[in-house]
Amino acid sequence: MLTGIRVWLTKNVGRWAYRDRQPRAATFRSHVTMRGALLGMFALYLLACLPAAWLHADAVAGVGFVVAAILAPAYARQDALLHIVISAPVIFLVAEVITQLLTAQGSSSRGSASVSRSRAPSASSLWPSHAM
């Protein structure tokens, strides 16, 4: 009877102990490519910069930068991490420039260098007249 209990304990308890010692497989495995992560970062940066420009709240853009800079590497493949981390400030700069262009006040024709609107300088503006 004692040997039967010992055999049962060895078989069953040993299996449970062995199962608990094994490293558990990752339950979360991401398959986001580098392009997808960079595009997601750009979208989040743009979505953060637009309300920040409209509301004049720079903290919103800062929070958006931090959130996208944390989420993109968390969901991306391991071989894309270096590209994502290096590209984050550049992508934010591009999103900020686009936001500033979209939310700029005033007329877009001002400062335009189009040929149809430009005038040739007149002779009087080239050679100023001096009274002697």
Image (tube, helix red, strand yellow):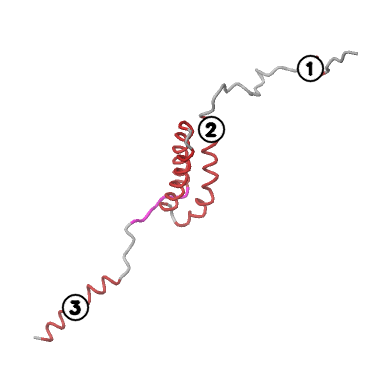
> Which residue occupies the foreground of this view, 113 or 33?
113
Counting other residues with Cα less than 10 Å from the Cα at mark 2, is it few (<14), some (14-19), or many (20 or more)?
A: some
Apparent side of residue 79 relative to residue 31 in the rendered image (left or right): right
Q: Amino acid at mark 3?
A: Lys
Q: Find the distance from the CA under tag 1 to the CA under tag 2.
A: 35 Å
Q: Amino acid at mark 1?
A: Ser
Secondary structure state at the residue bearing disc 2: helix
Q: Amino acid at mark 2?
A: Gln
Counting other residues with Cα less than 10 Å from the Cα at mark 3, is it few (<14), some (14-19), or many (20 or more)?
A: few
Secondary structure state at the residue bearing disc 3: helix
- In the rendered view, tell whether residue 107 sits above or below residue 20: above
Residue at the far right: name it.
132
What are the residue bounds of the magenta stretch? 28-34
Instruction: Say whether residue 35 is magenta.
Output: no
Find residue 119 and report its horizontal and vertical position in percent. Answer: 70, 17
Q: Main secondary structure of the magenta part?
A: loop
Q: Which residue is labeled 3 in the image?
A: 11
Q: Which residue is labeled 1 in the image?
A: 125
Instruction: Please give the name of the residue rendered at 13% of the width and 86% of the height, measured from the top-left corner.
Output: 3
Nearest-to-viewer mark from 1 and 3: 1
Residue at the far left: name it.
1
Q: Find the distance from the CA under tag 1 to the CA under tag 3.
A: 102 Å
Q: Which residue is labeled 2 in the image?
A: 100
Q: Earlier in the sequence, mark 1 or mark 2?
A: 2
Figure disc tally = 3
Q: Find the distance from the CA under tag 3 to the CA under tag 2.
A: 69 Å
- In the rendered view, tell whether residue 42 sits above or below residue 53: below
